[in-house]
Image (cartoon, rainbow, N blue to C red):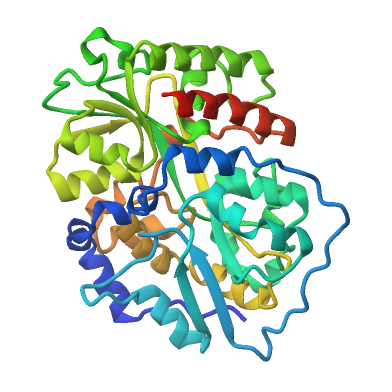
Amino acid sequence: MPLERPQDPMLIQAIRHSQAMQRARQLNLTRRGFLGAVGLGAGALALAACAPVTATQKALTPAADLSATQKTLIWDNWPGYMDEDDAGANPTLDAFRTQTGLDVTYNVAVDDNNTYYAKVKDQLALGQDIGADTVCLTDWMVSRLVRLGYIQDLDHANMPNLANMNASFANPDFDPGRAKSVPWQGGFAGICWNKEKVPNGLKSIDDLWSADLKGRVGVLSEMRDTIGLIMLNQGTDITGDWADDKFTNAMDVFTKHVSEGQIRNIKGNQYLNDLQSEDTYAAICWSGDITSLNATAGDKWQFAIPDSGGTLWNDTFVVPMGSAHKANAESVMNYYYEPEVAATLAAWVNYISPVDGAKEAMDAIDPELATNQLIFPDADTLSSVHVFRTLSAQEENDFGAQFQKVLLGS
């Protein structure tokens, strides 16, 4: 049965204090921030990324669902992806526990898509319990899990609030109709700059290659964002059926600017440290991170979607084949599609909410956040960003190896 719409005052209080909570956040606890905190370098990521992706040998059978008798749920997620109050409690998750009686273990366990996959891939391949009933991974990794047959079908009858899913998230190419996955939060990759050091700002990817910025540019170690933005700048529709030469052309530009020293750093979250220390003045970056950087280190940086377009990514719920608590997982997914709950969460994490009605819920309490295009993008904003199309297993290996070769040699 659907949960009643939450009117818990601690949810309302959480929204009212959202901006204060943002300022209290530490940079190494952002959604993409754990990479720097745990010291994962490019080499470690490359080893995980280049691990072979093989097809499942036989169809896996989902675990028997024990949700009716076992009121437990284990949820793995990224750091900085859950609302917190001043006492360190999680208002929305605590309200869910109270309403459902479920004993939820929330683990900050995903430090990177590749490294998380490396930890659980053997169990996934055998259909065994990975120690989590649900996990939120980025859409491109979810597409791999779908392709390999590692995740369970979802019962939409247990999630009536999915009617609140924004239509733009409803039919990804890797999971039409969202039969196996549910969006959690999303964001943009674009460009950013130090407003003091780059007073005229940036409009395009080409602006990053200006002589004035030589040796002061950072880019992301996430291939689909860095190469995706370059491909968009070259006129390629990254959502379409482009051929290998389009990727190669973008790699040529990337390799050139690395070898000539235009690009100083290729990093995960540590690019924020480089911006703050002024080791770099401009970067390819993630939208929500710049909001956090400005909130904690002074309003010195500007984020923009390049004139040729940005990339759009989503982190997404899935239920592994070995999970014995699918209905409980569906219950928490359903809960976070309540507009008031989604608004509370979005106010804290500053990433894109996939929930229709969350903007209106936010507008009633914090109109400033309700107009933030990084949280509630309108149609014009969404028309300027693009999802890097799903790669085949062969493309994933080949393109990843090309990118990591440059990354390791930088």
Residue 5 in view: yes
The residue at the point 63 percent across, 50 percent down is 142
Query: Quick check: 114 above or below 320?
Result: above
Quarter holding the C terminus is: top left
Q: Relative to residue 85, is residue 405 drawn left or right? A: right
Instruction: Point out the residue furthest to the right here.
Output: 58
In-image side of 23 versus 243 (left or right): left
Which picture quadrant has residue 136? bottom right
In the rendered image, residue 260, in percent from the top left (x then y), is placed at 36, 10
Residue 134 drawn at (x, y percent): 59, 67
Residue 68 placement, left or right of 42: right
Q: Is residue 23 above or below residue 138?
A: below
Q: Residue at x 69, y 18 (%)?
A: 243
The total number of labels drawn is 0
Query: Viewer-proximal residue, 106 or 261?
Result: 261
Give the position of the N terminus as an image quadrant: bottom right
Examine the rendered structure and indicate whether residue 194 appears above or below residue 211: below
Query: Residue 367 location in percent, x, y?
Result: 24, 54
Left/right of residue 25 with respect to residue 326 in the rendered view: left
Do we see residue 166 in this rendering?
Answer: no
In the figure, residue 124 lies in which quadrant? bottom right
**Would you place residue 257 above or below residue 401 in this image?**
above
User: Which one is in front, 81 or 367?
Assistant: 81
Residue 406 location (% of width, % of height): 49, 23
Residue at (29%, 79%) from the top-left corner?
A: 10
Name the one closer to the observer, 398 or 84.
398
Q: Residue at x 39, y 60 (%)?
A: 81
